[in-house]
Amino acid sequence: MAKAKGARIVITLECTECRSNTAKRSPGVSRYTTQKNRRNTTERLEIKKFCPHCNKHTAHKEIK
């Protein structure tokens, strides 16, 4: 039998400052993967995480 689609999905978080900042420590964009419950959190997730390219804690937003 087919399994029902779960409420938890895997999402990717991307640094918001890496995309626009050209004067950063190293080239590239910081990305993290995590899970979220699509029934409880319908809007896009935004979490402060450490970005090794900016060398500081920045806001990471959910991307498609």
Image: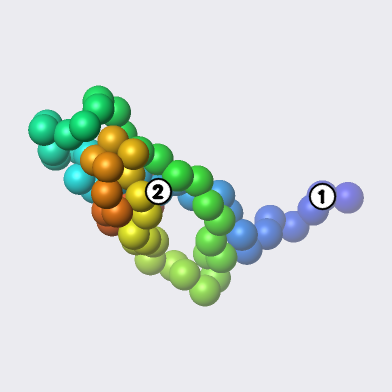
Estimate the spatial distance between the alpha carbons at disc 1 and disc 2, rounded to whole Å.
30 Å
Which residue corresponds to mark 1? 2
Amino acid type at mark 2 = Leu
Query: In the drawing, does residue 23 fall left or right of residue 29?
Result: left
Count up the numbered dots. Answer: 2
Numbered mark located on residue 13 in the image: 2
Amino acid type at mark 1 = Ala
Labels 1 and 2 touching (C-beta < 8 A): no
Query: In the drawing, does residue 24 fall left or right of residue 10?
Result: left
Query: In the drawing, does residue 9 fall left or right of residue 14?
Result: right
- In terms of depth relative to the viewer, which is nearer, 21 or 43? 21
Q: Residue at x 29, y 54 (%)?
A: 57
Q: Indicate the quadrant containing the C terminus: top left, top right, bottom left or bottom right.
A: top left
Task: Looking at this view, name the residue that lies furthest to the bottom.
Answer: 40
Secondary structure beneath dot 2 equals strand
Q: Residue at x 47, y 70 (%)?
A: 41
- In terms of depth relative to the viewer, which is nearer, 9 or 4? 9
Q: Is residue 44 visible?
A: no
To which quarter of the image does residue 15 belong?
Answer: top left
